[in-house]
Amino acid sequence: MKNLIAAVALALLVLPFGVSAAETKKDAPAPELARALELLEAKDFAGARAAVAPLAAAGDRDAKHMLGFMEERGYGGPKNVPRAIELYYEAAMAGSADAQYALGELAFNGGGVKQDYERALGWYRMAADAKHPGAATRLGQMHAEGLGVAKDAGLAASLFEQGAKGDDPRAAYFLGNAYLAGEGVPRNDRKAAEYYLRAAEQGHADAQYNLALLYDSDRLGPPDLQKTYVLMKAAAEAELPEAYVALGLMAHNGKTPTPEEPADWFEKAARAGDAQGQFLYAVALAEGDGRAKNPAEALMWLDKALLAADSLPESMRLNAAELRARLVKDARARAPKKPQLRQ
């Protein structure tokens, strides 16, 4: 099964249109802006744009940030990244930490602009100084991975802690990873579980997955299958492919509360592009285990898995190659023989 430290999740897990929890609690928006936000959350993009545009034109920094968000994503009108940058910049210069963070995100991800870690660092540092938890988290990630800066695991962990204090679930997840691996902080499985739980309770799928694996091990005490299943099911509901694989293996080993068909989970993983799921689904098709036997389709999924062989454990990669060779041999044996001239 995949290593406990799952792939880094880069999805924004903050309040609507990037407003930080800390800033929202500190400065309640004006009634007109609050109404625009309600319309945005209701996906009435035209109404939200009509409500916020006059406020932005009048110089309201938070309205400029919100309108920039809508311009960046094409909500209520055509997508216009250059205009979004103008609005974010005006709001950022007026002191909006959310706009500073948004500019950092554009530079970090290369969203409609050239990727530039140095520029991203500048905006993130400005926003982090204003206590923006998302900016602190992203700075922590950059120091953890050496993106535009020298690696510094201790500083990264400190920044993740700052982000976690601001209720950023990504920060709690990354801090859980740091405690699990002992990177920048002493290795501590219980601390890792504590931070994973904080992120998991906010819907962070990778944290749910990692915490489920911890509960399935003996690292927190005797394995707890109930907690493992509940957390893994939550990660699967968030469409995490690794969770599909894990649930399929739990079902195969009789570890689910009620009987489930492993092939159902392996198929979900396979169709989501997970190489392990593709191999395991191919096995189900090859053996007729939970699916009608279908060697041709099994071969197709094996080929998909082997194309992503780097993400397969070595033993699984070898098994996939062996199964493929057997299926090809069987197919050749079943092929009709070419007619021979009669002597």
Image: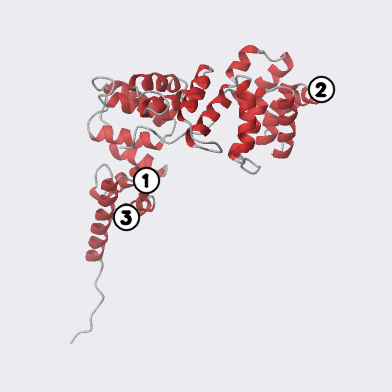
Disc 1 element: helix
Q: Which residue is mark 2?
A: 58
Residue 329 position within the rendered picture, expressed as x and y whole percent measured from the top left: 23, 62
User: Which marked residue is nearer to the observer: mark 2 or mark 3?
Assistant: 2
Residue 103 position within the rendered picture, expressed as x and y whole percent measured from the top left: 66, 32
Quadrant where the N terminus sits is top left
Question: Quick one: label 3 or label 1, which is nearer the N terminus?
Answer: 3
Depth check: 199 or 114 in front? 114
- Gap in Å between the C-alphas at discs 2 and 1? 53 Å
Q: Is residue 43 visible?
A: no
Q: Which residue is mark 1?
A: 311
Residue 10 position within the rendered picture, expressed as x and y whole percent measured from the top left: 51, 34
Amino acid at circle 2:
Ala
Disc 2 element: loop
Q: How many marks?
A: 3
Amino acid at circle 1:
Ser
Question: Quick one: label 2 or label 3, which is nearer the N terminus?
Answer: 2
Residue 16 position within the rendered picture, expressed as x and y whole percent measured from the top left: 60, 24
Local crowd size for mark 1, using a 10 Å CA cut-off: few (<14), some (14–19), many (≥20): some
Local crowd size for mark 2, using a 10 Å CA cut-off: few (<14), some (14–19), many (≥20): few
Q: Which residue is mark 3?
A: 299
- Gap in Å between the C-alphas at discs 3 and 1? 18 Å
- Most distant residue in the left direction: 343
Q: Is residue 276 visible?
A: yes
Amino acid at circle 3:
Leu
Residue 262 horizontal side relative to residue 72, left or right: left
Kindly identify the residue that appears in the image at 74 percent across and 26 percent down: 93
Kindly identify the residue that appears in the image at 37 percent across and 40 percent down: 269
